[in-house]
């Protein structure tokens, strides 16, 4: 038997960053993908999606050449064109709009942009080149509340504390289901193993979720909650901890506002909160006592708590509680990663963080992180007047399936003068585009998880080279050429100046920033020292070598370089998380702001909501291990088997509505109606139904042959774009009032 060639790379599909081992055939096609046992972080763990990564590359439906529309929107009437022609067309059409009004061009960035370093590095410069304020992304149907609360409390939207899974004695999870999602804002390959290890060392895991999820089953305890009420529960827990004496001795000196906490949380009495959340008072009290009694404990809340009308309050309350139990910035508690691509901050304090530096034109929604709420994108397109959005660039996203009131958005896309999508598929969103520019596959690019190593339960660095060369321009070249077009340059001229601009900006920051290992170096020397050749890798190299473990371009012998990482295909483990207070704080006060003003100003809304009327039935979401948002349903092995796009319904609700297992239910919300088959299960709380997102592949004009055969329905025809978390602009995707009837 001959030794087969293998290729090691990091899985780019979810936040877990698993190492993959690809065994190749003689023609270098992929024979099989397994978990990489030698990976320093994932140690062989893999899920069904990771083992099908090559199927995306091989998918005959994957676009290989640019498409230009020849017929009506909504039909599959496109022709393949040469890249230069596609770029010229985009330059001409975008140029016309940009020439009149920069804000008339909007951009939408989808989830895949966060996976890997290419688009993380090139996304911002591209947006800057467009010069528009109409920037939308999947962040406002996701984690924006956590950015806002972290910005307000710690000074930076990226200073997100993660649960120290591997050392904690007690983990309280709210609104996350990592045994299906593999974790989010908490990069931890083999989440199941890490949770089991907590139990094995005598610790406890408690899951709060309106469904008894796979994670809940694996935990020590599951607690049902009424959707949308987590912020109240967390503040009731905070109130109990304050009453019993908060454990803040260790970090008190780094905090601001501690004296005011008791008054702020006072309205959230156990009895009131028990009634609203439908959790017994005794259970709430015990939850608080256990958080305090455990040697170390940590509260971790995720998308089920963020995509509600109180998303930012829930995100803030989570960290407030971790402070009060004495578990912020402490092993076994909530800790900040120290990622390789950023320098260590030399001292606390900074400019702080603000939201609402500008507002959206129609709904007057506040900007957060330079973005406007994606739930408001349709109204910006459809409402006439000065500053109306007339052209749209989508980059790796499928908002027609992923954002609320999707029918309205689809209508809005048809109303545009021009739309261009950078995307490898002709799907529910890109079918509205005039031009589609397909980037190469994941196997044709290098990979480094810039975003997720900053959210990781260990400090890790792992870089993967491309497996294959690509004949077409890669994604950073596409972005560079579109940026040139946006700046009035010929997109078909040499893109080197655009790449140089990105690189020189990064080098400029690295040599200027205090704490950077390139501080004070001559930019020309830094540039001359670079080893990498690809523009995205060169930019990454600057970050790594000037970052906290870097070689400082020769000034720190033995320090981290990209070349070194390239020699370590299984990654480098840079150690467990370490305490970082107070230097990492960039608030204006240089302290942890426990009671930011905008949070305090929003609290009365939560107090009022405790006595509001409650709808009889609400809809929540669900994720499945074999699915990934909207875009892996064209992989046959992942979608075969039982139907996954089904409504979960409690037996009591089913009986009340006369619905039996497998029958169709018609669900109607304020904005739409959807009909789907029912699975009756006691694993969901009464008064709650659940339907996964990312389905609804039966729209005409797409090229997703496998997905079209198992279309499912689009749950975002029901979610309501009018219900936002006011502080972050995040959409409400959970707790949507619906009425049910047998179809
Ligand atoms: N297999 C798979 N993995 C994925 C993805 C995928 O689509 N499929 N998507 C990736 C992405 S983009 C993300 S952001 C992450 C998300 O990762 P997670 O945050 O773990 O997301 P979910 O698995 O949807 O878990 C959310 C849970 O919240 C519950 N929930 C709903 N409403 C409420 C509420 O009001 N309160 C509480 N306490 N719980 C509530 C839901 O029942 C659900 O179990 O997953 C990533 N990983
Ligand atoms: N009801 C409900 N709705 C939800 C959620 C929920 O829990 N409930 N979750 C929300 C969350 S957390 C998220 S993150 C969003 C996701 O929302 P989106 O980001 O809008 O949707 P995805 O399905 O991730 O879109 C992936 C798209 O990227 C393309 N793509 C894949 N790889 C690449 C690449 O390398 N480059 C480029 N340019 N394109 C690529 C795919 O072809 C596909 O078109 O959905 C949100 N919507
Ligand atoms: S858990 Fe996530 S990173 Fe790991 S193999 Fe599955 S999809 Fe890939
Ligand atoms: Mo997400």
Image (cartoon, helix red, strand yellow):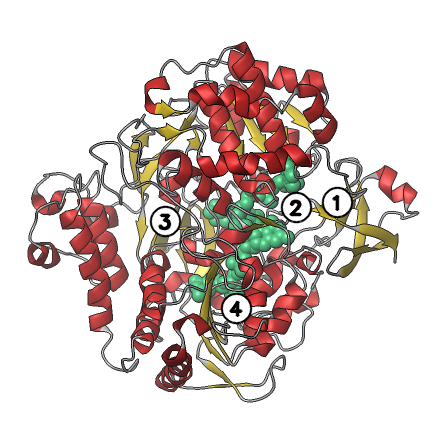
- Tell me which label, 3 or 2, sits earlier in the chain: 3
Q: Position of residue 506 (x, y in %)?
A: 21, 55
Tell me the distance, in whole angstroms, between the alpha carbons under discs 3 and 4. 24 Å
Give the residue drawn at x 40%, y 55%.
370
Quarter placement of the C terminus: bottom right
Would you say residue 215 is visible in this rendering?
no
Residue annotated with mark 4: 59
- Residue at left offset 46%, top offset 69%: 106
Ligand 3 within 8 Å of disc 3? The answer is no
Q: Nearer the viewer, mark 3 or mark 1?
A: 1
Disc nearer the start of the sequence (1/2): 1
> Can residue 173 be seen from the camera position used here?
yes
Task: Return the residue nearer the eye: 442 or 500.
Answer: 500
Q: Are marks 2 and 4 in contact (CB under 8 Å)?
A: no
Which part of the image, by quadrant, shows the N terminus?
bottom left
* Marks 3 and 4, the one that precedes in the sequence: 4
Disc 2 target residue: 734
Q: Residue at x 57, y 30 (%)?
A: 173
Instruction: Count neighbours of disc 2 (C-alpha within 10 A) and say few if under 14, some if 14 to 19, many if 20 or more.
Output: many
Alpha carbon separation for disc pair 1 and 2: 8 Å
Ligand 1 under 8 Å from disc 2 Cβ: yes
Label 1 with label 2: CB-CB less than 8 Å: yes
Label disc, if present, on residue 449 of the rendered structure: 3
């Amino acid at each position: 038997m001959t030794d087969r060639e293998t290729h090691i790379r990091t899985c780019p599909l979810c936040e877990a960053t698993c190492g993959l081992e690809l065994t190749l055939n003689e023609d270098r096609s992929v024979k099989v993908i397994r978990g990489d046992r030698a990976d320093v972080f994932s140690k062989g763990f893999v899920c069904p999606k990771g083992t099908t990564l090559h199927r995306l590359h091989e998918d005959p439906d994957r676009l290989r050449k640019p498409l230009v529309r020849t017929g009506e929107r909504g039909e599959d009437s496109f022709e393949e064109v040469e890249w230069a022609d596609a770029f010229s067309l985009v330059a001409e059409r975008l140029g016309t709009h940009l020439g009149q009004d920069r804000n008339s061009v909007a951009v939408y960035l989808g989830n895949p942009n966060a996976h890997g370093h290419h688009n993380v590095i090139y996304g911002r410069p591209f947006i800057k080149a467009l010069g528009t304020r109409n920037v939308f992304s999947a962040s406002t149907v996701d984690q924006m509340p956590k950015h806002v609360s972290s910005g307000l409390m710690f000074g930076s939207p990226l200073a997100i504390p993660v649960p120290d899974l591997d050392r904690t004695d007690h983990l309280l999870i709210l609104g996350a289901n990592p045994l299906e999602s593999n974790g989010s804002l908490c990069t931890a390959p083999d989440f199941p193993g890490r949770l089991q290890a907590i139990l094995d060392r005598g610790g406890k895991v408690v899951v709060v979720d309106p469904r008894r999820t796979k994670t809940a089953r694996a935990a020590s305890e599951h607690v049902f909650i009424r959707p949308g009420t987590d912020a109240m529960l967390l503040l009731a827990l905070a109130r109990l901890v304050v009453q019993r004496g908060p454990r803040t001795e260790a970090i008190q000196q780094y905090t601001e506002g501690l004296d005011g906490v008791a008054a702020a949380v006072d309205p959230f009495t156990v009895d009131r909160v028990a009634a609203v959340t439908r959790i017994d008072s005794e259970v709430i009290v015990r939850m608080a006592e256990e958080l305090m009694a455990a040697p170390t404990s940590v509260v971790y809340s995720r998308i089920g708590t963020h995509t509600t009308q109180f998303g930012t309050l829930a995100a803030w309350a989570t960290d407030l509680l971790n402070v009060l139990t004495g578990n912020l910035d402490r092993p076994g508690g909530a800790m900040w990663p120290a990622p390789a691509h950023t320098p260590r901050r030399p001292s606390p304090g900074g400019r702080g963080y603000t939201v609402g530096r500008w507002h959206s034109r129609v709904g007057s929604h506040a900007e957060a992180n330079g973005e406007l709420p994606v739930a408001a994108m349709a109204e910006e397109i459809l409402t006439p007047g000065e500053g109306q959005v007339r052209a749209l660039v989508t980059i790796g996203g499928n908002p027609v399936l992923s954002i609320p009131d999707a029918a309205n958005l689809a209508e809005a896309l048809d109303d545009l003068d021009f739309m261009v999508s950078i995307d490898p598929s002709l799907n529910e969103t890109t079918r509205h585009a005039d031009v589609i520019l397909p980037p190469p596959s994941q196997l044709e690019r290098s990979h480094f998880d810039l975003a997720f190593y900053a959210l990781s339960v260990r400090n890790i660095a792992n870089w993967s080279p491309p497996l294959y060369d690509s004949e077409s321009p890669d994604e950073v070249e596409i972005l560079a050429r579109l940026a040139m077009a946006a700046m009035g340059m010929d997109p078909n001229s040499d893109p080197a100046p655009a790449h140089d601009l990105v690189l020189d900006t990064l080098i400029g920051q690295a040599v200027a920033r205090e704490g950077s290992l390139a501080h004070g170096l001559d930019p020309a020397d830094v540039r001359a020292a670079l080893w990498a050749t690809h523009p995205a890798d060169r930019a990454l190299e600057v970050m790594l070598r000037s970052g906290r473990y870097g070689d400082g371009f020769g000034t720190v012998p033995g320090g981290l370089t990209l070349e070194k990482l390239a020699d370590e295909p299984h990654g480098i483990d840079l150690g467990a998380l370490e305490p970082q207070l107070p230097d990492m704080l960039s608030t204006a006060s240089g302290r942890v702001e426990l009671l930011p003003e905008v949070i305090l100003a929003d609290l009365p809304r939560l107090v009022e909501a405790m006595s509001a009327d409650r709808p009889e039935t609400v809809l929540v979401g669900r994720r499945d291990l074999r699915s990934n948002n909207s875009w892996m349903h064209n992989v046959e092995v992942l979608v075969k088997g039982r139907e996954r796009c089904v409504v979960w319904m409690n037996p009591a609700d089913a009986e009340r509505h006369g619905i039996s297992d497998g029958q169709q239910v018609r669900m109607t919300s304020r904005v739409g109606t959807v009909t789907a088959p029912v699975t009756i299960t006691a694993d969901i709380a009464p008064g709650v139904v659940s339907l996964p997102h990312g389905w609804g592949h039966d729209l005409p004009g797409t090229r997703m042959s496998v997905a079209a055969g198992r279309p499912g329905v689009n749950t975002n025809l029901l979610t309501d774009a009018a219900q936002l978390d006011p502080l972050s602009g995040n959409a409400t995707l959970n707790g949507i009032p619906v009425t049910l009837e047998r179809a």
